[in-house]
Image: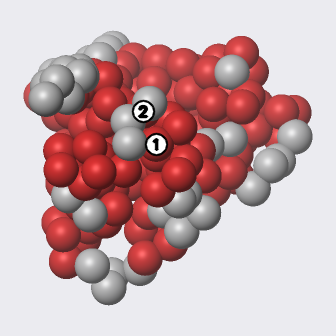
Amino acid sequence: MPRPREFDTKEAIASICDQFWSDGYEATGIADLESATGLARARLYSAFGSKQEMLYEAIDFYLDSRIDVIFRRVDDGGIAGVVNFFRTFAGIVAKQPERAEMGCLVVNSMIEFGRSEPELVARADRYRERVRGAFRSALERDAAEDRLAGDVESLADLAYVMLMGLYVTVKGGAPLEEINRLCGIAIAVVESWRVDPE
Protein backbone atom coordinates (compact mmCIF):
# COMPACT_ATOMS: atom_id res chain seq x y z
CA MET A 1 0.00 0.00 0.00
CA PRO A 2 1.58 3.35 -1.02
CA ARG A 3 2.33 5.83 1.74
CA PRO A 4 0.28 9.06 1.72
CA ARG A 5 1.99 11.99 0.04
CA GLU A 6 3.92 14.13 2.49
CA PHE A 7 3.02 17.80 2.65
CA ASP A 8 4.44 20.96 4.15
CA THR A 9 2.41 21.57 7.32
CA LYS A 10 3.41 25.23 7.54
CA GLU A 11 2.43 25.84 3.93
CA ALA A 12 -0.90 24.11 4.49
CA ILE A 13 -1.73 26.12 7.60
CA ALA A 14 -0.74 29.32 5.76
CA SER A 15 -3.30 28.43 3.07
CA ILE A 16 -5.93 27.64 5.72
CA CYS A 17 -5.14 30.97 7.38
CA ASP A 18 -5.63 32.88 4.12
CA GLN A 19 -8.92 31.09 3.45
CA PHE A 20 -10.41 31.93 6.85
CA TRP A 21 -8.98 35.44 6.65
CA SER A 22 -10.54 36.04 3.24
CA ASP A 23 -13.98 34.47 3.72
CA GLY A 24 -14.52 34.13 7.47
CA TYR A 25 -15.19 30.98 9.47
CA GLU A 26 -18.84 30.30 8.66
CA ALA A 27 -18.50 31.02 4.93
CA THR A 28 -15.50 28.68 4.64
CA GLY A 29 -16.43 25.06 4.03
CA ILE A 30 -14.17 22.03 4.24
CA ALA A 31 -14.30 21.89 0.44
CA ASP A 32 -12.81 25.39 0.38
CA LEU A 33 -10.01 24.26 2.68
CA GLU A 34 -9.41 21.20 0.50
CA SER A 35 -9.12 23.46 -2.52
CA ALA A 36 -6.88 25.97 -0.74
CA THR A 37 -4.45 23.34 0.55
CA GLY A 38 -4.72 20.64 -2.12
CA LEU A 39 -5.39 18.13 0.67
CA ALA A 40 -8.32 15.74 0.99
CA ARG A 41 -10.54 16.31 4.01
CA ALA A 42 -9.33 13.12 5.69
CA ARG A 43 -5.76 14.47 5.58
CA LEU A 44 -6.92 17.85 6.85
CA TYR A 45 -8.78 16.34 9.79
CA SER A 46 -5.90 13.99 10.55
CA ALA A 47 -3.31 16.78 10.48
CA PHE A 48 -5.22 19.63 12.09
CA GLY A 49 -8.37 18.30 13.76
CA SER A 50 -11.81 19.85 13.41
CA LYS A 51 -12.60 22.94 11.37
CA GLN A 52 -12.63 24.99 14.57
CA GLU A 53 -9.23 23.62 15.57
CA MET A 54 -8.00 24.58 12.11
CA LEU A 55 -9.15 28.14 12.80
CA TYR A 56 -7.21 28.23 16.08
CA GLU A 57 -4.07 26.93 14.35
CA ALA A 58 -4.56 29.48 11.59
CA ILE A 59 -4.82 32.30 14.14
CA ASP A 60 -1.69 31.05 15.93
CA PHE A 61 0.13 31.08 12.58
CA TYR A 62 -1.21 34.57 11.85
CA LEU A 63 -0.07 35.89 15.23
CA ASP A 64 3.42 34.41 14.91
CA SER A 65 4.15 34.99 11.23
CA ARG A 66 2.31 38.22 10.53
CA ILE A 67 1.36 40.22 13.62
CA ASP A 68 4.55 39.61 15.56
CA VAL A 69 6.70 40.37 12.50
CA ILE A 70 4.82 43.62 11.76
CA PHE A 71 4.92 44.88 15.33
CA ARG A 72 8.58 44.09 15.87
CA ARG A 73 9.11 47.13 13.64
CA VAL A 74 7.11 49.23 16.11
CA ASP A 75 8.73 47.94 19.32
CA ASP A 76 11.13 50.52 20.76
CA GLY A 77 10.60 52.74 17.71
CA GLY A 78 9.41 55.79 19.57
CA ILE A 79 6.70 58.04 18.16
CA ALA A 80 8.39 57.65 14.77
CA GLY A 81 7.75 53.89 14.93
CA VAL A 82 4.03 54.41 15.57
CA VAL A 83 3.80 57.03 12.82
CA ASN A 84 5.58 54.74 10.36
CA PHE A 85 3.15 51.95 11.24
CA PHE A 86 0.14 54.09 10.27
CA ARG A 87 1.94 55.29 7.11
CA THR A 88 2.64 51.68 6.16
CA PHE A 89 -1.00 50.80 6.84
CA ALA A 90 -2.11 53.54 4.42
CA GLY A 91 0.39 52.31 1.83
CA ILE A 92 -0.86 48.74 2.00
CA VAL A 93 -4.46 49.91 1.55
CA ALA A 94 -3.41 51.89 -1.53
CA LYS A 95 -1.22 49.20 -3.10
CA GLN A 96 -3.06 46.02 -2.07
CA PRO A 97 -6.72 47.01 -1.61
CA GLU A 98 -8.05 43.45 -1.92
CA ARG A 99 -5.70 42.29 0.83
CA ALA A 100 -6.49 45.30 2.99
CA GLU A 101 -10.23 44.66 2.69
CA MET A 102 -9.68 41.30 4.35
CA GLY A 103 -9.11 43.28 7.55
CA CYS A 104 -7.53 41.44 10.47
CA LEU A 105 -8.12 37.71 10.98
CA VAL A 106 -8.31 38.05 14.77
CA VAL A 107 -10.67 41.04 14.71
CA ASN A 108 -12.85 39.39 12.05
CA SER A 109 -13.05 36.18 14.09
CA MET A 110 -13.98 38.02 17.28
CA ILE A 111 -16.72 39.89 15.44
CA GLU A 112 -18.01 36.59 14.08
CA PHE A 113 -17.86 34.61 17.33
CA GLY A 114 -18.00 37.25 20.07
CA ARG A 115 -16.70 35.91 23.36
CA SER A 116 -18.45 32.55 23.05
CA GLU A 117 -15.26 30.55 22.40
CA PRO A 118 -12.67 30.64 25.24
CA GLU A 119 -9.88 29.41 22.92
CA LEU A 120 -10.57 32.30 20.58
CA VAL A 121 -10.83 34.82 23.41
CA ALA A 122 -7.40 33.74 24.68
CA ARG A 123 -5.93 34.35 21.22
CA ALA A 124 -7.69 37.71 20.94
CA ASP A 125 -6.24 38.69 24.31
CA ARG A 126 -2.78 37.68 23.07
CA TYR A 127 -3.29 39.75 19.92
CA ARG A 128 -4.48 42.81 21.83
CA GLU A 129 -1.58 42.65 24.26
CA ARG A 130 0.94 42.24 21.44
CA VAL A 131 -0.37 45.25 19.52
CA ARG A 132 -0.88 47.49 22.55
CA GLY A 133 2.43 46.25 23.92
CA ALA A 134 4.24 47.35 20.76
CA PHE A 135 2.66 50.81 20.91
CA ARG A 136 3.44 51.03 24.63
CA SER A 137 7.05 49.94 24.14
CA ALA A 138 7.55 52.47 21.34
CA LEU A 139 6.11 55.32 23.38
CA GLU A 140 8.07 54.37 26.49
CA ARG A 141 11.28 55.10 24.59
CA ASP A 142 10.27 58.73 24.03
CA ALA A 143 8.76 59.03 27.50
CA ALA A 144 12.12 58.02 29.01
CA GLU A 145 13.72 60.95 27.18
CA ASP A 146 10.92 63.40 28.15
CA ARG A 147 9.80 63.59 24.53
CA LEU A 148 6.24 62.32 25.06
CA ALA A 149 3.32 64.63 25.87
CA GLY A 150 1.04 62.34 27.81
CA ASP A 151 0.65 59.08 29.67
CA VAL A 152 2.16 56.05 27.91
CA GLU A 153 -0.69 53.65 28.75
CA SER A 154 -3.43 56.04 27.65
CA LEU A 155 -1.70 56.93 24.41
CA ALA A 156 -0.95 53.28 23.61
CA ASP A 157 -4.65 52.56 24.15
CA LEU A 158 -5.57 55.44 21.84
CA ALA A 159 -3.22 54.16 19.10
CA TYR A 160 -4.83 50.72 19.44
CA VAL A 161 -8.35 52.17 19.22
CA MET A 162 -7.42 54.18 16.12
CA LEU A 163 -6.08 51.02 14.48
CA MET A 164 -9.27 49.09 15.27
CA GLY A 165 -11.33 51.92 13.76
CA LEU A 166 -9.22 51.80 10.61
CA TYR A 167 -9.65 48.03 10.30
CA VAL A 168 -13.44 48.37 10.51
CA THR A 169 -13.44 51.28 8.05
CA VAL A 170 -11.39 49.34 5.50
CA LYS A 171 -13.40 46.15 6.02
CA GLY A 172 -16.57 48.17 5.46
CA GLY A 173 -15.39 49.13 1.98
CA ALA A 174 -14.76 52.83 2.54
CA PRO A 175 -13.20 54.61 -0.47
CA LEU A 176 -9.44 55.07 -0.57
CA GLU A 177 -9.74 58.84 -0.15
CA GLU A 178 -11.55 58.40 3.16
CA ILE A 179 -9.08 55.82 4.43
CA ASN A 180 -6.15 58.07 3.48
CA ARG A 181 -7.80 60.98 5.28
CA LEU A 182 -8.36 58.89 8.43
CA CYS A 183 -4.79 57.54 8.33
CA GLY A 184 -3.62 61.14 8.02
CA ILE A 185 -5.64 62.06 11.10
CA ALA A 186 -4.16 59.13 13.04
CA ILE A 187 -0.66 60.20 12.04
CA ALA A 188 -1.34 63.82 13.03
CA VAL A 189 -2.69 62.68 16.40
CA VAL A 190 0.40 60.58 17.09
CA GLU A 191 2.71 63.39 15.95
CA SER A 192 0.94 65.72 18.41
CA TRP A 193 2.28 63.57 21.25
CA ARG A 194 5.85 64.58 20.40
CA VAL A 195 7.65 67.02 22.69
CA ASP A 196 10.57 68.64 20.91
CA PRO A 197 13.63 69.26 23.09
CA GLU A 198 14.26 72.90 23.89
Residue toward you, 172 or 105: 105
Q: Quadrant of residue 27?
A: bottom right
Q: Residue 162's x, y, as percent? A: 53, 50
- Does residue 136 appear in this view? no
Q: How is the image coloured?
A: secondary structure
Residue farthest front in this picture: 1
Task: Tell me the element at label 1.
Answer: helix
Residue type at mark 2 is: Thr
Query: Neighbour class for label 2 at 10 Å: few (<14), some, many (≥20)?
Result: many
- Could you tell me which quadrant the C terminus lies in? top left
- Could you tell me which quadrant the N terminus lies in? top left
Q: Residue 11's x, y, as percent? A: 31, 23
Q: Name the residue carrying label 2.
A: 37
Residue toward you, 165 or 191: 165
| Residue at 87% from the left image edge and 40% from the top image edge | 175
Q: Quadrant of residue 107?
A: bottom left
Q: Is residue 50 above or below residue 67?
A: below
Per the model, the C-alpha gap separating discs 1 and 2 is 5 Å
| Residue at 47% from the left image edge and 18% from the top image edge | 84
| Residue at 32% from the left image edge and 85% from the top image edge | 116
Residue type at mark 1 is: Glu
Q: Is residue 150 above or below residue 198?
A: below
Q: Name the residue carrying label 1.
A: 34
CB of mark 1 within 8 Å of CB of mark 2? yes
Residue toward you, 138 or 100: 100
- Does residue 11 appear in this view? yes
